[in-house]
């Protein structure tokens, strides 16, 4: 059982990731930067959403931007990822 600073029990989960060698450094970096990649994808999605919703775009540009946003969502669904 874990106790927080106030002496009460804490329900915070802990995760330990172990790598066998220094050659696993790339995998370690990917694990550590996961939240940064999530944030990057979120910001790109929101940028495209904002452009589609509020900007006067030609029909061609609108279709291409909409297709790019849908592709992002498709890739995320395929990999079991979502923004919530």
Image (cartoon, helix red, strand yellow):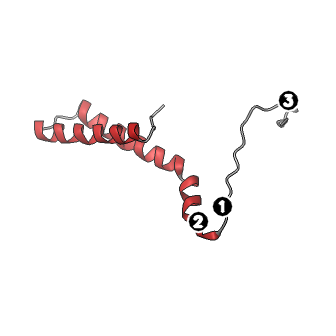
Which residue is denoted by mark 1 in the rendering?
19
Q: Could you tell me residue 21's position as x and y percent?
A: 65, 68
In the image, residue 60 sits, relative to residue 36, either above or below, namely: above
Mark 2 burial class by Cα count in 10 Å: few <14, some 14-19, many 20+? few
| Residue displayed at 47% across by 44% down | 38
- Mark toward the start of the polypeptide (1 vs 3): 3
Asked if the residue under mark 2 is in contact with the one under mark 3, i.e. CB atoms within 8 Å, the reply is no
- Closer mark to the observer between disc 3 and disc 2: 2
Front residue of this view, candidates 84 and 16: 16
- Mark toward the start of the polypeptide (3 vs 2): 3
| Residue displayed at 39% across by 36% down | 77
- Mark toward the start of the polypeptide (2 vs 1): 1
SS of the residue under disc 1: loop
| Residue displayed at 53% across by 46% down | 35
In the image, residue 17 sits, relative to residue 56, either above or below, namely: below
SS of the residue under disc 3: loop
Front residue of this view, candidates 41 and 70: 70
Q: Could you tell me residue 16's position as x and y percent?
A: 70, 50
- Closer mark to the observer between disc 1 and disc 3: 1
Which residue is denoted by mark 3 in the rendering?
8
In the image, residue 27 sits, relative to residue 16, either above or below, namely: below
Query: Is residue 34 rendered to the left or right of residue 77?
Result: right
Which of the numbered marks, if any, corresponds to residue 61?
none
Mark 3 burial class by Cα count in 10 Å: few <14, some 14-19, many 20+? few
Which of the numbered marks, if any, corresponds to residue 25?
2
């Amino acid at each position: 059982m874990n106790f927080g600073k106030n002496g009460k029990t804490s329900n915070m989960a802990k995760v330990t990731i172990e790598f066998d060698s220094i050659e696993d450094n790339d995998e370690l970096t990917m694990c550590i930067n996961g939240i940064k990649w999530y944030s990057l994808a979120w910001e790109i999605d929101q940028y495209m959403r904002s452009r589609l919703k509020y900007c006067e775009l030609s029909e061609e540009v609108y279709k291409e931007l909409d297709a790019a946003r849908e592709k992002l969502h498709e890739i995320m669904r395929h990999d079991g990822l979502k923004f919530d």
